[in-house]
Structures are given as structure tokens and as C-alpha cells.
Amino acid sequence: GFYKVNIDEAWNKELFLGGIVVVRDSNGIFVNGVARRDDFMHSPIHAEALAFRDGLVLKSTRGSYKVIFKNDSLQIISALRDPVIDISYIGHVIEDSKIVLRSITEASSPTFVVKPTVLTIA
């Protein structure tokens, strides 16, 4: 089996609402999810980065199954794949995500396939 993790931002500046993560199994059955409210969220890309980190953390608690991360932010996916330390204003979130991603990939010996909106870890 595998898990599919859908990640998206739904940023609302007034309410400090941000990312949404939904995890489903290979049969499409809901497994887990999270919606984030954060007083320190500054932009849609910040919300997207936080949501991606939340999705990675949720996956890390599920064991070593194949996982497909679906996301529409090539900026976030590219930043996660970049070996250079990210010093942008969302860099701390990206670097945290890289650490979680490494722990996931060490457990499952993944291969990566990047498509315009999909990051697959097999």
C-alpha cells in the first residue's frame, strides 16, 4: 500500500489560517489531517511551507510505506530538493522539512520523481 498526502495553503491574513494537509491510504480512505492556525504566518508561501512540513511530520508517524506528496508549489518542492541551506525568510521551515524528509527517506530507501505538482517517495 501507499499513502497520498495532499498539501495546500489556504492563507487568510486576518484569521492567521494557513495550510491544510489530508492523508489518505491507497484506497482513498482518510487517515489523518491537519489545518493550521499560526499567529506568525506571514504569507501564502509561508503557509505552504508550514503545511508541507506538517505533511512530512504526519507521514513520518506512519512507518515506511510508499508516499506520494501532492502539492502545487514548485517553489517548495524545489527548495526541499536543493542541498544548499535555505536562508530565505521561510528557510527555517524548509530546513526543518529537509530533516524530516531525510528521516523518512532513510527508513524507506526512496526514489524521487518530481512532476509539476507531485513529489513521490517510493
Image (tube, rainbow, N blue to C red):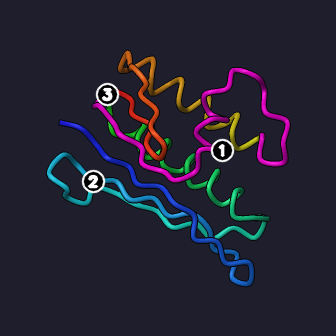
Q: Give the label on residue 22, or none.
A: none
Residue that badge 2 annotates: 24
- Dot 2 lies on which element? strand
Comparing labels 2 and 1, the label whose residue is closer to the camera: 1
Q: Report the amino acid beneath label 2.
A: Arg
The magenta span reads 64-91
Would you identify the image quadrant in which residue 84 lies?
A: top right
10 Å neighbourhood of mark 1: few (<14), some, or many (≥20)? few
* 114 sits to left or right of 31: right
Query: Looking at the figure, which quarter contains the N terminus?
Result: top left
Spatial CA distance of label 2 from label 3 is 15 Å
Residue beneath the point at 70% across and 34% down: 95
Instruction: State if disc 1 and disc 3 touch (CB < 8 Å).
Output: no
32 or 28: nearer the eye?
Answer: 28
Q: Position of residue 69 (x, y in %)?
A: 42, 43
Is residue 72 on the magenta stretch? yes
Q: Give the label on residue 75, or none.
A: 1
Would you identify the image quadrant in which residue 67 lies?
A: top left
Would you identify the image quadrant in which residue 36 lies?
A: bottom right
Spatial CA distance of label 2 from label 1 is 24 Å
Instruction: State if disc 1 and disc 2 touch (CB < 8 Å).
Output: no
- Dot 3 lies on which element? loop
10 Å neighbourhood of mark 3: few (<14), some, or many (≥20)? some
- 76 up-or-down from 107: above or below: below
Residue beneath the point at 66% across and 60% down: 47
Query: Farthest residue in the front direction?
Result: 116
Q: Position of residue 101 (x, y in %)?
A: 53, 30
First in sequence, mark 3 or 1: give its number.
3
Residue that badge 3 annotates: 64
Spatial CA distance of label 3 from label 1 is 26 Å
Q: Position of residue 33 (x, y in %)?
A: 40, 60
Query: Farthest residue in the left direction?
Result: 27
